[in-house]
Amino acid sequence: MTIPDADRFARDWCQAWNAHDVEAVLAHFHDDVVFTSPVAARVVPESGGVVRGKDALRRYWTTALAALPELHFEIVATYAGTQALVINYRNHRGQLVNEVLIFDGDLVREGHGTYLD
């Protein structure tokens, strides 16, 4: 199994985030995606940091973006595996973040936002 072109995927993903276009970001994900993030635990406390399904992910990201109008990402590097892609980026606060994406075909089945402590 292979993943989409890593650089193209990361570029499209980043452009969608920087445009604050949640639907464009979600277009990369399966309907039954599972996404984990410590930010989700803060934004949607009842999730415990685990967001299940595209509709729940849409609500999480829409809520988060409403609170972060300055959100902007800059890609530092991409790392490709056979089923995984890691996007290392710097966010609007200057923090380094990794998005770990596990693919099933051309779409993300599982994602994990990871941050430095």
Image (spheres, rainbow, N blue to C red):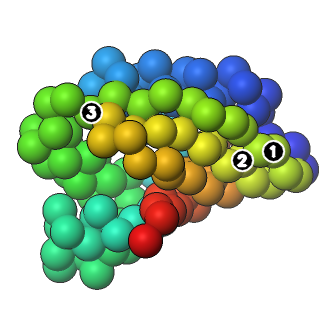
The reply to whether dot 3 and dot 1 touch (C-beta < 8 Å) is no
Q: Which residue is mark 1?
A: 80
Separation (CA) of disc 2 from disc 3: 22 Å
Q: Are marks 1 and 2 in contact (CB under 8 Å)?
A: yes
Number of marks: 3
SS of the residue under disc 3: loop
Distance Cα–Cα, label 3 vs label 1: 25 Å
Dots 2, 3 in contact, CB < 8 A: no
- Where residue 81 appears, as percent x and y from the top left, is 85, 51
Check disc 2: other Cα within 10 Å, few if <14, some if 14-19, many if 20+. many
Q: Quadrant of residue 20?
A: top left
Element marked by disc 2: strand
Is 45 in front, or is 77? 77
Q: Nearer the viewer, mark 3 or mark 1?
A: 3
Q: Judge whether residue 4 can be spotted in this image.
A: yes
Q: In this view of the protein, which residue sits in the foreground, 58 or 90? A: 90
What residue lies at 17% left-to-right and 75% top-to-bottom?
A: 45
The residue carrying pointer 3 sits among few (fewer than 14), some (14 to 19) or many (20 or more) residues within 10 Å by Cα, namely some
Residue at point 27%, 58% (across, down):
56
Name the residue tied to disc 3.
Answer: 71
Residue 90 is left or right of residue 72, and the answer is right
Q: Position of residue 26 (x, y in %)?
A: 42, 38
Q: Which residue is at the front of the view, 102 or 106? A: 102
What residue type is disc 1 on? Answer: Ala
Circle 2 sits on which residue? 85
Give the answer, above or below, for where 51 lies relative to 23.
below
